[in-house]
């Protein structure tokens, strides 16, 4: 069961619906495909096994790896997103990253009426 947020800084892990889809499609399945390709190449080119055995030994560990790696791929994606788009620690979850603009300061007496 994943944590709701970081116990150290309070950074919320859960985002809007669909946020972690790219972690599953790109990171998890991509890592699974790379692992599968690596296993296939090692078994086929170095050990010269028959294709049925190579496919069996390549495809059997991939679902286990993908289930195990799903939580880690979400953590990698969250760290990647936080690195490139840091969110503020103000606790608000309005999507602006905690960078709210201050209200406009009142016009100075020199600029009232458009004159300087």
Image (spheres, helix red, strand yellow):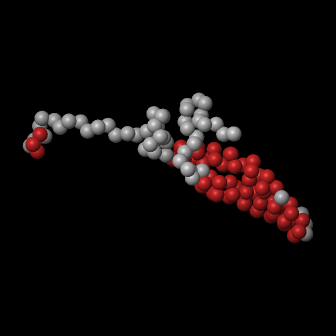
The structure residue drawn at horizontal position 69% and vertical position 49%, both measured from the top left corner, is 70
- Asked if 6 appears above or below 41 in the picture, the reply is above
Q: Can residue 112 be spotted in the picture?
A: yes
Quarter that holds the N terminus: top right
Q: Is residue 21 left or right of residue 60?
A: left
**Residue situated in front as seen by the camera: 80 or 15:** 15
- Is 60 on the left or on the right of 5, as rendered? right
Q: Position of residue 112 (x, y in %)?
A: 11, 40
Residue 48 can be seen, yes or no: no
- Residue 47: name its quadrant: bottom right
Residue 97 location, x and y as percent? 45, 42
- Is 50 located above or below residue 102 in the figure? below
Residue lying farthest bottom?
51
Residue at the outermost front position: 17
29 and 4: which is toward the camera? 4
| Residue 75 image offset from top left, x and y in percent | 63, 44
**Residue at (46%, 37%) from the top-left corner?**
92
- Residue 28 falls left or right of residue 84: right
Residue 37 versus residue 29: which sits nearer the camera?
29
Instruction: Please tell me which residue is depicted at 75% across the width and 48% down the height of the picture.
Output: 68
- 17 relative position to 35: left or right: left
Image quarter (top left, top right, bottom left or bottom right) of the C terminus = top left
The residue drawn where x is 66% and y is 39% is 2
Q: Position of residue 57 (x, y in %)?
A: 86, 60
């Amino acid at each position: 069961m994943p944590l709701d947020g970081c116990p150290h800084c309070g950074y919320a892990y859960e985002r809007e619906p669909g946020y972690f889809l790219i972690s599953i499609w790109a990171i998890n399945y991509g890592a699974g495909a790379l692992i599968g390709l690596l296993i296939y190449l090692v078994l086929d080119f170095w050990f010269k096994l028959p294709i049925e055995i190579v496919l069996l030994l390549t495809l059997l560990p991939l679902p286990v790896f993908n289930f195990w790696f799903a939580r880690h791929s979400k953590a990698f994606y969250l760290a990647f997103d936080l690195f490139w788009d840091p969110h503020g620690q103000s606790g608000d979850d309005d999507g602006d990253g905690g960078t709210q603009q201050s209200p406009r300061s009142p016009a100075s007496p020199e600029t009232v009426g458009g004159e300087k």
